[in-house]
């Protein structure tokens, strides 16, 4: 599966988690890109091992540029969620419904952009 061939809408909203808002957190300048260093610092807060995060990076950075565009970053977030839920870290797993990724760092986990979810009653939780 080619990451670039996947529709962006697949990653915009997963169980209410707005990946678009997460992108604004890691890319405050709205450049549309996340560098390797910033992505690594952010994704390490998932609690996954460096080995798993390395595999996620390799899959998301499909063109080996050392940075992720918006769609590639969304792929990384989905793969983090897949790994956290015991699924194989592979592009095939992107089609599996999983809860949004979680982050251990309390400053990130409590950040409204990261945990922005809309309940069935459309109430911010």
Image (cartoon, rainbow, N blue to C red):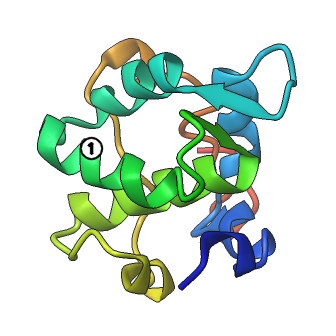
* Quarter of image, res 82: bottom left
Of residue 113 and residue 20, the one placed in the foreground of this image is 20
Residue 65, image x, y percentages? 60, 39
Residue drawn 15% across the image and 70% down it: 86
**Residue at far front of view:** 64
- Residue at the disc numbered 1: 54
Residue drawn 58% across the image and 44% down it: 125
7 is higher (above) or lower (below) than 81: below
Residue 32, image x, y percentages? 82, 34
15 is higher (above) or lower (below) than 103: below
* Quarter of image, res 111: top right
**Residue at far right of view:** 30
Residue drawn 50% across the image and 55% down it: 60
49 is higher (above) or lower (below) than 111: below
Residue 20, image x, y percentages? 76, 46
* Quarter of image, res 12: bottom right
Left or right: residue 113 compared with residue 84: right
Of residue 112 and residue 63, the one placed in the foreground of this image is 63
Left or right: residue 38 compared with residue 119: left
Left or right: residue 7 compared with residue 119: right
Query: Within 10 angstroms of label 1, few (less than 14), some, or many (20 or more) residues?
Result: few
Of residue 16 and residue 51, the one placed in the foreground of this image is 51
């Amino acid at each position: 599966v080619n990451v670039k061939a996947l529709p962006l809408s697949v990653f915009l909203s997963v169980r209410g988690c707005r990946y678009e808002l997460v992108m604004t957190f890691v890319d405050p300048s709205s450049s549309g890109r996340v560098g390797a260093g910033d992505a690594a610092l952010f994704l390490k807060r998932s609690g996954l091992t460096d080995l798993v995060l390395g595999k996620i990076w390799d899959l998301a950075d499909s063109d080996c540029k050392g940075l992720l565009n918006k769609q590639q970053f969304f792929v990384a977030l989905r793969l983090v969620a897949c790994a956290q839920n015991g699924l194989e870290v592979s592009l095939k797993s992107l089609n599996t419904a999983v809860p949004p990724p979680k982050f251990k760092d309390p400053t990130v986990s409590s950040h409204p952009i990261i945990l922005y979810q809309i309940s069935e009653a459309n109430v911010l939780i």
